[in-house]
Amino acid sequence: MKRIIAIASVAVLAACSPAAEAPAEEAVAEAPAEESMAGTYDVTTEEGTGSTTIDVDGNYTNTVDGEATETGTVARVDGKACFTSSEEGAEAVCWTDGEPAEDGSWVATSDDGTEVTVRRADEEAADDAAAM
């Protein structure tokens, strides 16, 4: 299950659409701030489900059944969400986010081809509240 959450944590990042190319001098002045990845995400793999929480500083915690299973840092690199476990010697695992489905979930694919389904949990809570 720890492997699931490690895999899932990378997939958790919501992809931002790249802005249209602007002339170089305008690009600097008008470059949008990178969207924060902070939030809680539900992650489903072949082995089960868990969640990943990312704080505003880029630290993540993977949780299964209410128990933290892994911590580390996450950063967006070349449009991918790259997670690096705090375990000694860990290498970053990078994920590419697919297009969002109608329910707000998306499939994230690691560089080695592993796929997980991700959905931002705080959006799910907002959807549930709106339905009431």
Image: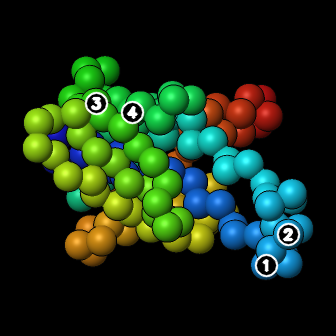
Image quarter for residue 72? top left
Give the Cα distance between marks 3 and 1: 36 Å
Q: CA distance from mark 1 to mark 4?
A: 31 Å
Q: Is residue 66 left or right of residue 42?
A: left
Quadrant for the N terminus in the image: top left
Q: In this view of the protein, can residue 64 be seen by the observer?
A: no
Q: Amino acid at mark 2?
A: Glu
Residue identified by numbered label 4: 60
The answer to whether the residue labelled 2 contacts the one labelled 1, judged by CB atoms less than 8 Å apart, is no
* Tag 3–tag 4 contact (CB < 8 Å): yes
Residue at (41, 43) in percent of width and height: 74
Q: Which residue is mark 2?
A: 25
Q: Badge 1: how crowded within 10 Å, few (<14), some, or many (20+)?
A: few
Distance CA(mark 3)–CA(mark 4) = 5 Å
Q: Residue at x 48, y 40 (%)?
A: 41
Which residue position is annotated with label 1? 21
Task: Name the residue beneath numbered marker 3.
Answer: 71
- Amino acid type at mark 4: Tyr
- In this view, the residue in front, 64 or 81, is 81
Q: Residue at x 61, y 33 (%)?
A: 122
**In the image, what residue occupies the spot 57% across and 54% down?**
14
Q: Mark 3 vs mark 1: give the one in front.
A: 1
Say what amino acid the circle numbered 1 marks: Glu
In primary-sequence order, the first of circles 4 and 2 is: 2
Residue 104 appears at what percent x and percent y?
63, 55
Q: Residues within 10 Å of mark 3 (few under 14, many from 20)?
A: many
Q: CA distance from mark 3 to mark 2?
A: 39 Å
**CA gap, disc 2 and disc 1:** 11 Å
Is residue 34 in sight in this rendering? yes
